[in-house]
């Protein structure tokens, strides 16, 4: 009968696969697309916060439809920009335009976010539904965006923890 040390088997189950290979980390750190993503992500989040406030204001008071609409369009254009540049980043780092293993579920959910924002634009351009219907759709798009942003924040944190662990590991220093 084989006996395993419970602490080592538990540790093996808890250790996730690293997000980046050493080569991918070098590509990530050297591409200008990493900086572009680092600028666009917080910018998009600020636009999201301001736009959310404008949409909620409209829904609560019936005022400010134009400002809310402009902010939603701006948020959507920023989303398209970050999706395109993020795809380029993923191609440079992982050699896949989208759905690299490390970001597969984030990319899947990003498409839902993109679909809802695009549906808003279709409704706006086609004058479909009421102003309120469009604003409610925008809120649904924003809710999915908030979840997706959370996914990426968790990945960023995991990447930082991986980098810190590699920097302090005696095995990493010996391999370098």
Image (cartoon, rainbow, N blue to C red):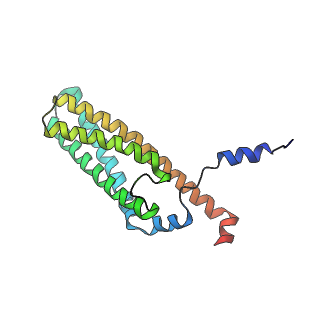
In the rendered image, the vertical position of residue 29 relative to residue 102, given as above or below: below
Q: In this view of the protein, which residue sits in the foreground, 45 or 86?
A: 86
Residue 164 shows in this picture:
yes
The spot of residue 174 in percent (x, y) is: 69, 71
List the single residue furthest toward the bottom. Answer: 176
Q: Residue at coordinates 37% horizontally, 63% vertically from top-left? A: 33
Asked which quadrant contains residue 82, the reply is bottom left
Q: Is residue 110 left or right of residue 78?
A: right
Q: In this view, does 121 lie to the left or right of 2?
A: left
List the single residue furthest toward the front. Answer: 1
Q: In which quarter of the image is the N terminus?
A: top right
Q: In this view, does 96 lie to the left or right of 8?
A: left
Q: Residue at coordinates 45% horizontally, 63% vertically from top-left? A: 93
The spot of residue 38 in percent (x, y) is: 39, 58
Q: In this view of the protein, which residue sits in the foreground, 166 or 95?
A: 95
Asked which quadrant contains residue 31, the reply is bottom left
Q: Residue at coordinates 30% horizontally, 41% vertically from top-left? A: 115
In the rendered image, the vertical position of residue 83 relative to residue 3, given as above or below: below
Residue 58 shows in this picture:
no
The spot of residue 146 in percent (x, y) is: 38, 40
Q: Residue at coordinates 41% horizontally, 44% vertically from top-left? A: 108
The spot of residue 160 in percent (x, y) is: 54, 56
Q: Quadrant of the C terminus?
A: bottom right
- Label count reads 0
């Amino acid at each position: 009968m084989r006996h395993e040390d419970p602490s080592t088997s538990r540790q093996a189950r808890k250790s996730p696969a690293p997000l980046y290979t050493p080569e991918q980390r070098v590509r990530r750190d050297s591409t200008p697309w990493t900086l572009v993503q680092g600028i666009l992500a917080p910018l998009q989040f600020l636009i999201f916060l301001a736009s959310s406030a404008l949409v909620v204001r409209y829904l609560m008071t019936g005022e400010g439809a134009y400002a809310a609409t402009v902010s939603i369009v701006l948020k959507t254009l920023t989303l398209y920009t970050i999706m395109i540049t993020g795809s380029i980043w993923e191609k440079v780092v992982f050699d896949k335009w989208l759905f690299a293993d490390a970001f597969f579920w984030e990319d899947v959910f990003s498409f839902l976010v993109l679909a809802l924002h695009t549906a808003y634009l279709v409704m706006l351009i086609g004058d479909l539904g009421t102003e309120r219907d469009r604003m409610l759709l925008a809120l649904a798009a924003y809710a999915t965006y908030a979840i997706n942003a959370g996914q990426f924040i968790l990945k960023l944190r995991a990447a930082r923890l991986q980098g810190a662990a590699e920097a302090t590991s005696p095995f990493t220093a010996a391999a370098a």
